[in-house]
Structure formats: structure tokens, C-alpha cells
Amino acid sequence: MTYILGSRCSDGVVLIADRKLTIDYGSGYLYDEKLFGEIRNIIIGFSGDIGTFELFRTRLRDVVADNPQMSQDKFILETSKIMNDLSTKYYREEHNFDAW
């Protein structure tokens, strides 16, 4: 189970996350980062399948690189599109959901 905690403080926000990653459907685990700050002013945390997250992170980096002056609203919209695309391709098809 992933745990990410966020709290406001006097000079910003503090984010804390555990580092344990389960692999191969519970057959083992390893430790790695779950919080990433490679896009200016944005911290991304993840839980779930690391492979799918890496696809998300790569696509998001490409969008930001192609649109460096993107507004906050546009960033949220593009993030939502990426999440929907990945969900449709890797989750809905795999679990045979016809409509969400």
C-alpha cells in the first residue's frame, strides 16, 4: 500500500511518501522513489504499477517540453488526457470494461 501525505507549512507544502514498491503481483518488493519533481513547480507522486507510471511520466514530460509556457489549466487538461489514454489502453481493455 502506498502512503503519500501532504501538509501545508509556513513556507510551502511538505510531501512525504513511503518507498516500498511491490513487484510481480506481490512476489517481492524493492525500494525506490514515489515522488518526482522534474517539472518546475510540480511534484508528482504515484502508486500502482511502476511501468504505467513511467509511461505517464514520459508523456507528461513531452507535453511540457513541447509547451513550455503552458497555463495551469492547460496542464491539468493535458494531464487528464494522458491519464485517460493510459487507463483506456492498459486498464479498461485488460479488465474488459466496456464503458466508464
Image (cartoon, rainbow, N blue to C red):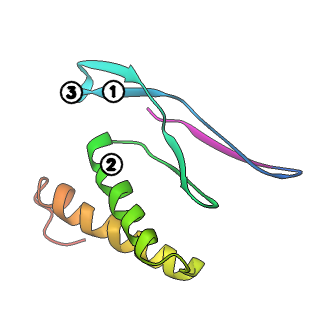
Residue corresponding to mark 3: 24
Residue corresponding to mark 2: 54
Q: Is residue 56 above or below residue 75?
A: above
Q: Which residues are magenta?
A: 1-8
Task: Note whether residue 49 is visible.
Answer: no
Secondary element under disc 2, as helix, strand or loop, is helix
The amino acid sitting under disc 1 is Thr
Residue drawn 39% across and 71% down?
A: 63
Q: Main secondary structure of the magenta part?
A: strand
Q: For the residues labelled 1 and 3, say whether their Cβ atoms are less than 8 Å apart.
A: no
Q: Position of residue 69 (x, y in %)?
A: 56, 80
Q: Nearer the viewer, mark 1 or mark 2?
A: 2
Residue drawn 52% across and 46% down?
A: 36
User: In 3D space, how far apart are the residues under numbered discs 1 and 3 (Cα atoms)?
Assistant: 7 Å
**Mark with earlier residue (2, 3):** 3
Residue drawn 25% across and 62% down?
A: 86
